[in-house]
Image (cartoon, helix red, strand yellow):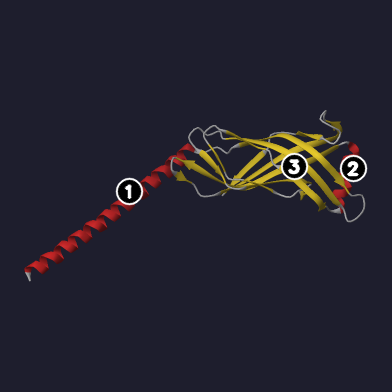
Amino acid sequence: MSEKIASVNVGCSNSKKLKWFAWGTGGLIVFIGLLVFVVFLVLHPSKPSFNLEDVTFYQFNVSKVPPYAITIIMQVTLSSRNPNSRIGVEYQPLHVYATYRDQQITMAYLLPPTYQGHKEPVVWSPPLTGYDMPISPYSQQSLDQDWHAGVVLMNIKLQGDVKWKVGTWISPKYHLYVHCPANIRFGDLSNSGPNLIKGQPVDHCDVEIAS
């Protein structure tokens, strides 16, 4: 009888030890997570900068009669730089597309997930295409006027999610919005051939990050 009681006592003691060990391990993990989060807040990450390096058009056609549509074959080169010295950036799949007067005129190109280390640059050169993309009569009229004026202002947009990384800690997702204006000057053809039209980036890209 005494042996059974001793066995029960030993079992209870081991169970308590396991519980305390589990609680201690869980508390340590929570403490480390909170510590990294506090460090993340203290470091206060700066948003990455983006530049539109190049825009090349291989085809640009606009219908003159209803239903109005536009056909574009182009390639853009976008660069990004992480200004943070201790925080990495994880780009989730990003969508890149072109717009004219807030109307999408190419299909969205999906960029693969990319990790950007401290102070590290990243460059993408996605092709953008749009075949018989419908545009409104107002956009067609404005585009026709810009075409005759010799300059068309377009926007290259990039959208997706990003995460910040400090050590092994990774933040929740944040929404990334990038807006890059570019002037297309018709008649200013490149020396590579008569079918190429080079776009001129207007300014640095606007970058917004929202929770």
Which residue occupies the extreme bottom position in the image?
1
For label 3, the residue is 155
Residue 116 falls in image quadrant: top right
Q: Which amino acid, mark 3?
A: Asn
13 on left or right of 172: left
Measure the alpha-carbon separation of dots 3 and 2.
17 Å
Q: Of the residues shown, which amino acid type is indicated by label 2? A: Gln
Query: Which mark, by number, is residue 28?
Result: 1
Q: Mark 2 or mark 3, which is nearer the start of the sequence?
A: 2
Q: Nearer the viewer, residue 50 or 62?
A: 62
Mark 2 and mark 1 lie on one chain; the one further toward the N terminus is: 1
Cα separation between marks 2 and 1: 66 Å
Between disc 1 and disc 3, whose residue precedes?
1
- The quarter of the rendered structure image containing the N terminus is bottom left
Task: Judge the density around disc 3: few (<14), some (14-19), many (≥20) Cα neighbours within 10 Å.
Answer: many
Decide: is 59 above or below 188. Answer: below
From the viewer's side, name the closer residue of 110 and 162.
Answer: 110
Residue 119 percent location from the top left of the image? 54, 32
**Circle 2 — which element?**
helix
Q: Quadrant of residue 156?
A: top right
Residue situated in front as seen by the camera: 191 or 143: 191
Kind of residue sitting beneath label 1 = Leu
**Callout 2: 10 Å neighbours few (<14), some, many (20+)?**
few
Task: List the single residue furthest toward the top.
Answer: 191
Q: Residues within 10 Å of mark 1 (few under 14, many from 20)?
A: few
Look at the numbered disc 3 and give the secondary structure of its residue. strand
Q: Secondary structure at mark 1?
A: helix
35 vs 6: above or below: above
Residue at 62% across / 48% down in the picture? Answer: 160
**What residue is shown with label 2?**
145
Query: Looking at the image, how many numbered discs can be counted on the residues?
Result: 3
Is the C-beta separation of discs 2 and 1 under 8 Å? no
